[in-house]
Image: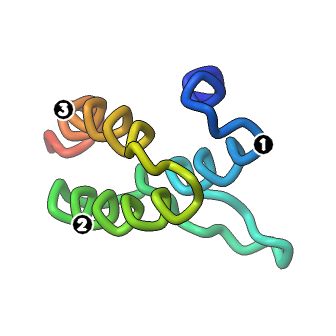
Amino acid sequence: MKSALGSFGVAGRQRDYIDYVFGSVDKDGIYVAGLLDAESPEEFVATLQSLRQRWVERGDKSEIVYSWVSERREMKHGFVFLK
């Protein structure tokens, strides 16, 4: 993901995007859930939509990051939500 983000022109902000997708640990040691922590397809889509605007505000004006993540969401659905 990091190399893809670099090619999208968001170098220097890659960590933010990665944290939004994979989650992170804040300065107090508390885990902050990411997109991949969604527990259902509906939650995943809702979270992805909320990130869409945040990413536009952070510089993804062409929504290339959103499109790239969105195209790969079937991987999440196929592997995790088939229980």
Question: Of residues 15 and 78, which is closer to you in this image?
Answer: 15
Instruction: Give the mark toward the camera: 3 or 2.
Output: 2
- Mark nearer the N terminus (1 vs 2): 1
On the image, the x and y values in percent for residue 56 come to: 46, 58
> The residue under label 1 is which amino acid type?
Gly
On the image, the x and y values in percent for residue 55 come to: 49, 57
Residue of label 2: 46
> Quarter-wise, where is residue 18 in the image?
top right
Local packing at callout 3 (Cα closer than 10 Å; few below 14, some 14-19, many 20+) is: few
Instruction: Give the mark toward the camera: 3 or 1.
Output: 1
Residue of label 1: 12
Local packing at callout 2 (Cα closer than 10 Å; few below 14, some 14-19, many 20+) is: some
Residue drawn at (59%, 22%) of the image: 7
Question: Of residues 3 and 45, which is closer to you in this image?
Answer: 3
- Mark nearer the N terminus (3 vs 1): 1
> Quarter-wise, where is residue 4 in the image?
top right
Residue drawn at (31%, 38%) of the image: 67
Lateral position of residue 11 relative to residue 48, left or right: right
Residue of label 3: 78
Answer whether labels 3 and 1 touch (C-beta < 8 Å).
no
> The residue under label 3 is which amino acid type?
Gly
Local packing at callout 1 (Cα closer than 10 Å; few below 14, some 14-19, many 20+) is: few
In the rendered view, tell whether residue 30 sits above or below residue 72. below
